[in-house]
Image (cartoon, rainbow, N blue to C red):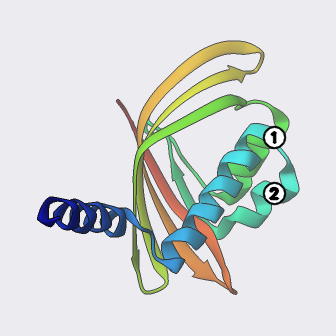
């Protein structure tokens, strides 16, 4: 009986340790919207998820603002075909969320197929009731 109780307590501890808060779940929803927008290239969805003050850093060192980020993806110059995100962490501090993950993606930039493997840091900020991407920095994994 003690073993069963101990097993239940340990199981509950593991489950509650990995449970997300309501804010973390809301940030995850925003991350899902970002991924969907980047794959679809839908301009309105990209405009919606990106903050006006966006600073989007690429692994090669190029940094762009919101307009360039949206235009590159909406035009197909930067084309994500698939995205696989792993090892993701989300930490919410007030109206700011810090997200880290590994990104493996297939691309088709300007019609040229490619593979991307990156470590990504994202900063989301709550703006007008919605979580928006404020900053992103990637490095090659």
In the rendered image, the quadrant that contains the C terminus is top left
Residue 14 appears at what percent x and percent y? 29, 61
Residue 27 higher or lower than 83, as above or below:
below
Mark 1 residue element = helix
**Which residue is disc 2 drawn over?**
45
The answer for how far apart the CA atoms under marks 2 and 1 are is 9 Å
Residue projecting furthest to the front: 1
> Do callouts 2 and 1 mark residues in contact (Cβ within 8 Å)?
yes
Residue 81 appears at what percent x and percent y? 71, 27
Q: How crowded is mark 1: few (under 14 residues within 10 Å), some or many (20 or more)?
A: some
Q: Nearer the viewer, residue 92 or 128?
A: 92
Earlier in the chain: of badge 2 and badge 1, it is: 1
Residue 48 higher or lower than 136, as above or below:
below
The residue depicted at 22 percent of the width and 61 percent of the height is 4
Q: Is residue 10 left or right of residue 77?
A: left
**Which residue is disc 1 drawn over?**
40
Q: In this view, does 120 lie to the left or right of 33?
A: left
- Within the image, what quadrant is residue 74 found in? top right
Mark 2 residue element = helix
């Amino acid at each position: 009986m003690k073993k069963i109780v101990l097993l239940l307590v340990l199981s509950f501890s593991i489950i509650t340790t990995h449970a997300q808060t309501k804010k973390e779940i809301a940030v995850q929803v925003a991350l899902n919207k970002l991924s969907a927008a980047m794959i679809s290239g839908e301009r309105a969805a990209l405009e919606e998820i990106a903050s006006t003050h966006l600073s989007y850093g690429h692994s090669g060192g190029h940094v762009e603002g919101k307009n360039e980020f949206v235009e590159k993806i909406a035009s197909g110059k930067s084309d994500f075909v698939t995205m696989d995100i792993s090892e993701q962490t989300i930490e919410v501090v007030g109206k700011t969320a810090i997200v880290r993950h590994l990104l493996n993606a297939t691309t088709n930039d300007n019609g040229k197929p490619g593979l991307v493997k990156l470590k990504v840091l994202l900063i989301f900020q709550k703006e007008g009731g919605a979580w928006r991407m404020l900053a992103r920095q990637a490095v090659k994994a």
